Image (spheres, helix red, strand yellow):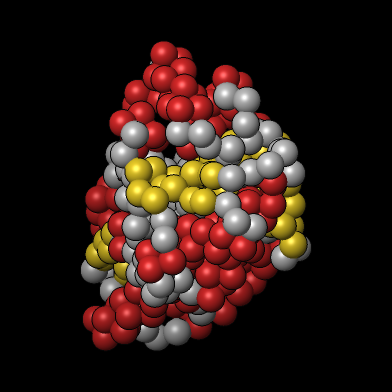
Amino acid sequence: MSVKKIAVLTSGGDAPGMNACIRAVYLAARNEGIDVIGFQHGYNGLLKRDYVEFAHKDIRNLIQRGGTVLYSARCEKFHKEEHRKKAASYLEELELDGLIVIGGNGSFKGAELLQQIWNKPVIGVPGTIDNDIAGTDYTIGYHTAIQTAVESIDKVRDTADAFERIFIVDVMGRDAGFIALNSAIAAGADHVVLPETFESAGDELVRILDKLDQRRKNHANSSHIIVITENLWPGGLNILCDSLQSETGVETRILTLGHVQRGGSPVWQDRILATKLGAYAVEMVMNNERGRMAGIRHRYPESVPLENSREDRKPLNHYSMSMLDKITLLG
Ligand code: F6P
């Protein structure tokens, strides 16, 4: 198949490294003499024919920038078939030979449905801080989000130590514990609460109090850092905070990291991942692959059916899980 013009868009939660991926798509495509346009604001830009024609000047100084120059959005309209049909006919009118969608699970669902009605390659590139996409070891933005969380936990530990307080650090991840688990390990937190292992608030509270007791046996300082995945604690973190304070008598505070985890300059792991996957996605279009994702396995790109990207819950690293108790108790 002769490919002359392709489009790229970023959709869903923005992630550091999306710009590096756009840059790689452009450079890899231009190297093959292929023109690249970018739809703005995710699928909304596709529906409104709101796009930019990329030129070399647009991708200069881009690899290190957070956010996405194409803007991002979640597109309600794309859930409806009539709008997807419109999108497919615009893609035809614009004489496009392929579409690359950089985004997460929701964006891939849209890509899969679009592929069913458009007869040219639609390729997904996993871009989300949550790392919750099956079929790929990592997603673009995940490493930077961990780095941001680790730096924040390191800082809050200073004040936790000074005041001998308990801090509950709420990190993103949607329904997945990747950011929580790895930021907790890297920052040497005392306890981590993960959606993958959480059973009930009662059981978890017992576990946290147990850890606190054990830590106090080893350390005079009663400061304690608990990392928890967002939206996990039934009724919200104030409930956990109050319980800890009344059970221990130790002042307890909540730190919600929130959207700062989505921002900032991508760390090298995300830049390289984004560059590999962007270039590989262009190859996939040229190979006329349909409805697939550019994933990464053991540092090499791999073509994966889009539907496999939303298989059952992607597992956390078993070894990291098994060593958690051993390493957190040493504090
Ligand atoms: O998927 C990325 C993510 O940042 C999740 O970690 C988080 O749950 C969600 O998006 C937040 O979405 P919004 O930006 O719409 O508040």
Q: Is residue 104 left or right of residue 122?
A: left
Q: Nearer the viewer, residue 125 or 320?
A: 125
Q: Position of residue 168 (x, y in %)?
A: 34, 62
**Most foreground residue, 213 or 253:** 253
User: Position of 263 compared to 308: left or right?
Assistant: left
What percent of the width, then of the height, locates residue 206?
A: 47, 53
Q: Position of residue 14 (x, y in %)?
A: 38, 52
Write the residue at 27% across / 69% down. Answer: 250
Q: Is residue 291 above or below residue 119?
A: below
- Give the quarter of the image for residue 151: bottom left
Quadrant for the N terminus, please: top right
Residue positioned 48% across, 37% down in the render: 107
Return the residue nearer the eye: 104 or 282: 282
Residue drawn at 32 percent across, 80 percent down: 155
Q: Is residue 118 positioned above or below 199 on the image? A: above
- Locate residue 301, reporting x and y percent: 72, 57
